[in-house]
């Protein structure tokens, strides 16, 4: 598994990842309105599996690593904005 990522790195990525989510999925939500620890699926932001696939593609292009659909950690990775930013911070190559 990857090394630990500094919390300040994750915090710095939160606004960028929130903007990426909103722009990639054309959401009618301001990036600042996405709570860092709220669920991205279901009751939280309301994303579905198609949204996650689209988002994974944009993330792979922007940050230089692949998010695979069969990864058993996807529920954790896409669990919240903070979890996603943490994963990006640990895996990014760009």
Image (cartoon, rainbow, N blue to C red):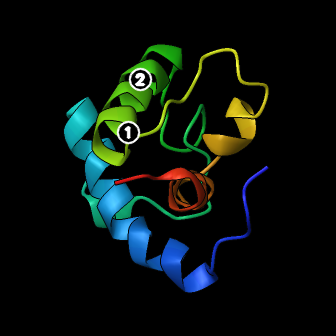
Q: Position of residue 53 (x, y in %)?
A: 45, 19
Neighbour tally class for label 2: few under 14, some 14-19, many 20 plus, Cα within 10 Å: some
Left or right: residue 69 compared with residue 19: right
Q: Which residue is mark 1?
A: 59
Residue at the (76%, 34%) spot, across then down: 73
On screen, 75 above or below 16? above
Q: Which residue is mark 2?
A: 51
Q: From the viewer's perspective, is the residue at label 1 or at label 2 nearer?
A: 1
On screen, 18 above or below 36? above
Q: Circle 2 sits in a helix, a strand or a loop, which is it?
A: helix
Residue 88 badge: none
Asked if residue 28 can be seen in this view, the reply is no
Please identify the residue farthest to the bottom as the structure is shown. Answer: 8
Question: Residue 79's quadrant in the figure?
Answer: top right
| Residue in the foreground of this view, choosing between 71 and 21 | 71
Residue at the (36%, 47%) spot, across then down: 63
């Amino acid at each position: 598994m990857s090394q630990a990522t500094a919390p300040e790195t994750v915090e710095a990525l939160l606004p960028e990842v929130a903007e990426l989510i909103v722009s990639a999925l054309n959401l009618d939500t301001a990036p600042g309105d996405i709570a860092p620890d709220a669920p991205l699926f279901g009751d939280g932001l309301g994303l579905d599996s198609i949204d996650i696939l689209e988002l994974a593609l944009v993330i792979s292009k922007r940050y230089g690593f692949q998010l695979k659909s069969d990864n058993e950690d996807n529920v954790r990775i896409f669990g919240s904005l903070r979890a996603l930013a943490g994963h990006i911070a640990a895996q990014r190559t760009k």
